[in-house]
Amino acid sequence: MRKQELMFAVLKQLAAAETDIVGKGVAKVVQLSKLPQRTLAINAHVLHRTIARRVAAIIVKIDRRPRLALLLRPLRTTAVGRWLARRLLGYYRFYETIAEAEASASKYLDRSHTHPSTIDRQLSVSRRLRVSDYPVLFYIRPLLTGDRVLFDLGGNVGNLFYCYRRYCDLPPGFRWRILDLPQTMEAGRQLAFERGFANTLEFASTLQEASGSDILLLSGAAHYFDQSLPEMLTTLADPPPHVFINRAPLIRGDTCVTVQDAGYVMHGCKLFNVEALQAGMRKLGYRVVDQWEAPELSLHVPLYPECSAPAYSGFYFSR
Ligand SMILES: C[S@@+](CC[C@H](N)C(=O)[O-])C[C@H]1O[C@@H](n2cnc3c(N)ncnc32)[C@H](O)[C@@H]1O
């Protein structure tokens, strides 16, 4: 009991000072002090999470300065260094699959995509346009004519539909079709009904329902799929002529899988190499109409700047 109380006190101290520690947009404040005392007392992973976040924040800061970053090299290149890095950084490492990363993340914070806070959060951030929404809206508005279908992959409960519709005249017959996780789509159906959009907002069961649609929108979700965007498009009999990928943490290094620590939730995620993605799209006959940065978001893999996205990316592909 004494040991538990001591641990609780230590964790509270650490949590009190815990702020944005992995650079802009990554690990925001987690209110450890608001979690039940029992969880805190018994969960050594919580303590490890706090340490890992702090170490990661320091490393990311050093990584930004190439000369200082040389000092960190042994943490990548020597066996002892790698062992130490693994002990200190915990879940900030590479995995084989998203499922494996997700399993590791859940030990440190058992909140992922279907946690109720994520739906509230998506609806709340979409009350206003984010910087990276502007290029999408600019290109999408003229395309929203007649009885076209927009397929919104990873569309949550329709947060972007509710946001974008304020800036577009959606014609009668136009349909916005979402594919997300079943639990999230159930909440989306309910919300669409309550808000009177059950005729415009549809919910799909499989990716194949993107076949024959006019526009594919993959916003803030490309990194949650094991398949890359071109790999997914290859499975469609009739791929959409207009494809938008937005808010994607695309990287210069080789495609890799890691844990994304967003502070209030943690996810397994796959960071795709930007050139491979473009080459894959070219192979399918798409050309880049435009590309942009989503500076409001970043994702860092400490010690591996080439596998980090200091800003997310967006592309409009057409064919
Ligand atoms: C950050 S939200 C993006 C919401 C919205 N598209 C936007 O840009 O604001 C990521 C979404 O991807 C969804 N997602 C994650 N893994 C998924 C999967 N395997 N299949 C379908 N959706 C998934 C999550 O449930 C979540 O709604």
Image (tube, rainbow, N blue to C red):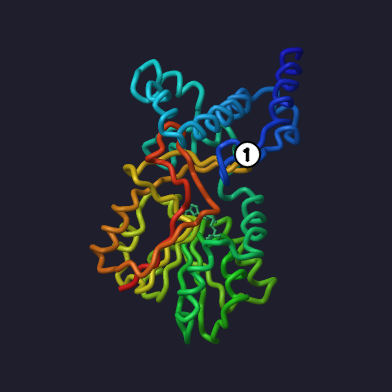
- Residue to which mark 1 is pinned: 20
Where is residue 289 drawn, in percent x and y? 35, 70
Toward the viewer: 22 or 93? 22
Q: Is residue 52 above or below residue 225?
A: above
Ligand 1 closer than 8 Å to the CB at disc 1?
no
The total of numbered circles placed on residues is: 1
Find the residue positioned furthest to the front. Answer: 67
Residue 29, quarter of the rendered image: top right
Residue in view at x 43 percent, y 42 percent: 308
Where is residue 10 drawn, in percent x and y? 71, 21
Judged from the image, the secondary structure of the residue bearing numbered disc 1 is loop
Residue 232, quarter of the rendered image: bottom left
Toward the viewer: 162 or 288? 288
Q: Amino acid at mark 1?
A: Asp
Find the residue positioned furthest to the left. Answer: 283
Where is residue 209 drawn, in percent x and y? 41, 69
Q: Is residue 303 above or below residue 223?
A: above
Residue in view at x 58 percent, y 57 percent: 184
Compared across the picture, whether 84 is left or right of 289 comes to: right
Residue in view at x 48 percent, y 39 percent: 259
Q: Quadrant of the C terminus?
A: bottom left
Compared across the picture, whether 154 is left or right of 210 comes to: right
Residue in view at x 47 percent, y 52 percent: 312
Compared across the picture, whether 208 is left or right of 193 comes to: left
